[in-house]
Image: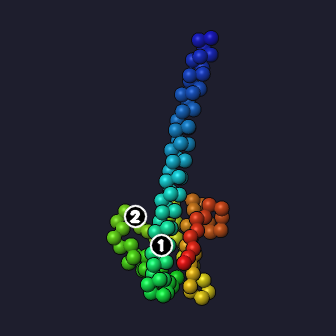
């Protein structure tokens, strides 16, 4: 009986680091998703405001400069990349009146299920 109890305690202890690592990884992933969703929202709000005020959106070529200038007060992280380190992908519609802003998600590949997308205005 004592040996069985010790064996169970060792099994729980040995599995604990793996469980802690899994919990940590899940927490980091959730934080990356929340942070990226917040960035996408902030960028899209400012793109919408730019469209309302200027009656135009920045071109795809202008977007990196527009982003830097619009968020120049942000010192926390580079806003041109998502929380996985992938650059945001900004595309304009053919008539230039709407946009799509993509985060490529953790896999860094466009068009997969982990992408996050905002569009407007």
Q: Nearer the viewer, mark 2 or mark 1?
A: 1
**Quadrant location, the C terminus:** bottom right
Residue under the image location 49 percent in, 78 percent down: 48
Residue 104 visible in the snapshot: no
Residue 40: horizontal and vertical position, in percent? 50, 67
Asked whether, in this view, residue 10 is left or right of residue 68, the answer is right
Asked whether, in this view, residue 42 is left or right of residue 75, the answer is right
SS at badge 1: helix
Residue under label 2, please give it.
77
Residue 33: horizontal and vertical position, in percent? 53, 57
Label 2 to label 1, Cα distance in Å?
18 Å
Residue 107 visible in the snapshot: yes
Residue under the image location 48 percent in, 77 percent down: 47
Residue under label 1, please give it.
45
SS at badge 2: loop
Instruction: In the rendered view, tell whether residue 20 sits above or below residue 98.
Output: above
Instruction: In the rendered view, tell whether residue 76 sits above or below residue 97.
Output: above
Residue 68: horizontal and vertical position, in percent? 40, 75
Q: Dot 2, how many residues are within 10 Å of its Cα: few (below 14), some (14-19), or many (20+)? A: few
Q: Nearer the viewer, residue 103 or 7?
A: 103
Residue under the image location 44 percent in, 84 percent down: 53
Q: Dot 1, how many residues are within 10 Å of its Cα: few (below 14), some (14-19), or many (20+)? A: some
């Amino acid at each position: 009986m004592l040996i069985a109890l010790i064996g169970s305690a060792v099994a729980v202890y040995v599995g604990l680091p793996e469980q802690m690592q899994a919990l940590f990884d899940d927490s980091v992933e959730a934080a990356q998703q929340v942070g990226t969703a917040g960035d996408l929202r902030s960028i899209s709000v400012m793109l919408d405001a730019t469209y309302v005020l200027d009656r135009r959106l920045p071109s795809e070529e202008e977007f990196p400069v527009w982003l830097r200038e619009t968020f120049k007060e942000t010192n926390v992280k580079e806003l041109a990349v998502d929380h996985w380190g992938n650059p945001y992908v900004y595309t304009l519609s053919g008539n230039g009146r709407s946009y799509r802003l993509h985060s490529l998600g953790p896999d860094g590949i466009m068009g997969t299920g982990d992408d996050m997308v905002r569009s407007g205005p």
